[in-house]
């Protein structure tokens, strides 16, 4: 990718919204209604057509489960990469066929830098053992690219080398090197219980995911344990999933803020077309980077969306399959 390249150059979304968000969302809906046969059939089942849509609330959101049962593609293309969600043996997983790796790379890089500044300021340390042990993880792809983009000689992944990780963090702290330790929840807990270490120059970010490795705990309990073990004031969190090409970030208290080309909304459990900008219910996500799949995804997360666009995940809808990234009880 050329320096300064943006999603706009790749036919994606305009830089920085939000004043352009509604017309861009409706434009993408019109395109996906025409070029995504699966999505068109879904919209038609609710008798929703482009001529009747003038606000994001009127757009039908495709249930996330469709990524497990059908190819979700806008147009015809051979994917440059296919991401797959994690799952237990025999469990059907989501598949997201991505037309443009450059689009995904640009989305997560720009998103990260909007919240945290230049990637090159950081030593990026990934603690994602379960994800590294399988192929097709969009999270591993993202962290691997951030490691490369950081250009820091000590950026890298750690599996179960906790003693070496402790030594590295100690050295980085002595050198006052700004660092990011991003990890799956069970691995962060395993590490901090064996090697507690006070951190001053390192951000710790959990991505969710107990994955049946440990007893389920609440996010508040997780953060309390990590705060104590790392001597920090707050634990950061990342909200992302296989079915999305963008992320939201929390700098504490479980309140996520989406990137400008991503929007959280709420739907009622008993009426999928009753969509509101704010309130409490089931979480809908508009991800304008999903221009080649479906930008309008109905998740299985229970959430609260606030007037400033931030959101809080409260739990999971009953009887929904648990995503590997979200087996953490909230």
Image: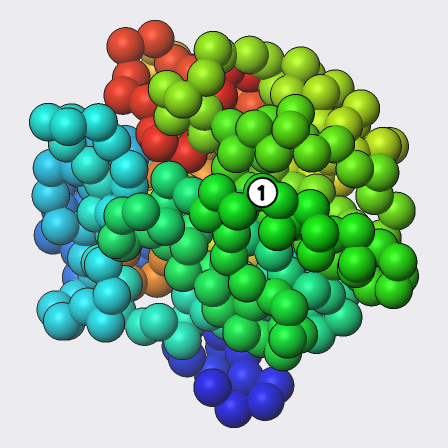
Above or below 22: residue 325: above
Residue depicted at x 83% and y 43%: 199
Residue depicted at x 28% and y 10%: 319
Q: Position of residue 105 (x, y in %)?
A: 46, 69
9 horizontally vs 293: left or right: right
Q: Position of residue 80 (x, y in %)?
A: 23, 72
In the picture, which quadrant includes the C terminus? Answer: top right
Q: Taking the image as drawn, is residue 144 in sight? A: yes
Residue depicted at x 74% and y 19%: 224
188 horizontally vs 122: left or right: left
Q: Position of residue 211 (x, y in %)?
A: 38, 26
Quarter holding residue 75: bottom left
Above or below 166: residue 280: above
Badge 1 element? helix
Return the residue nearer the eye: 150 or 188.
188
Return the residue nearer the eye: 324 or 24.
324
Dot 1 crowding, Cα within 10 Å, few <14, some 14–19, many 20+: some
View extreme (bottom): residue: 2
Residue depicted at x 14% and y 71%: 77
Q: Taking the image as drawn, is residue 277 in sight? A: no
Quarter holding residue 147: bottom right
Return the residue nearer the eye: 153 or 30.
153
Q: Position of residue 249 (x, y in %)?
A: 64, 44
The residue under label 1 is 162
Return the residue nearer the eye: 1 or 220.
220
């Amino acid at each position: 990718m050329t320096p300064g390249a943006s999603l706009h150059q790749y036919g994606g979304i305009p830089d920085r919204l939000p004043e352009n968000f509604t017309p861009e969302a409706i434009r993408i809906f019109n395109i996906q209604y025409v070029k995504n046969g699966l999505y068109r059939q879904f919209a038609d089942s609710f008798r929703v057509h482009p001529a009747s849509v003038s606000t994001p609330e009127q757009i039908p959101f495709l249930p996330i489960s469709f990524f497990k049962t059908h190819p979700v593609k806008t147009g015809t293309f051979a994917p440059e990469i296919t991401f797959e969600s994690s799952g237990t043996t025999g469990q059907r997983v989501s598949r997201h066929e991505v037309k443009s790796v450059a689009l995904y790379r640009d989305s997560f890089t720009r998103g990260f830098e909007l919240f945290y500044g230049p990637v090159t300021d950081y030593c990026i340390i990934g603690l994602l053992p379960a994800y590294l042990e399988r192929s097709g993880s969009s999270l591993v792809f993202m962290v691997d690219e951030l490691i490369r983009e950081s250009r820091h000689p000590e950026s890298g992944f750690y599996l179960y080398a906790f003693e070496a990780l402790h030594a590295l963090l100690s050295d980085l702290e002595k050198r006052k090197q700004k660092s990011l330790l991003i990890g799956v929840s069970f691995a962060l807990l395993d590490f901090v219980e064996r090697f507690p270490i006070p951190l001053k120059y390192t951000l710790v970010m959990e991505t969710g995911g107990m994955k049946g490795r440990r007893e389920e705990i609440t996010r508040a309990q997780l953060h309390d344990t990590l705060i104590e073990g790392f001597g920090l004031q707050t634990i950061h969190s990342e909200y992302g999933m296989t079915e999305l090409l963008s992320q939201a970030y929390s700098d504490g208290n479980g309140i996520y803020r989406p990137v400008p080309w991503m929007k959280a909304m709420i739907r009622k459990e008993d009426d999928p077309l009753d969509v509101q900008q704010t309130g409490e219910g089931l979480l809908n996500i508009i991800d304008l980077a999903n221009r080649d799949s479906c930008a309008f995804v109905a998740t299985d997360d229970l959430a609260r969306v606030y007037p400033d666009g931030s959101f809080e995940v409260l739990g999971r809808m009953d009887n929904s399959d648990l995503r590997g990234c979200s087996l953490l009880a909230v």
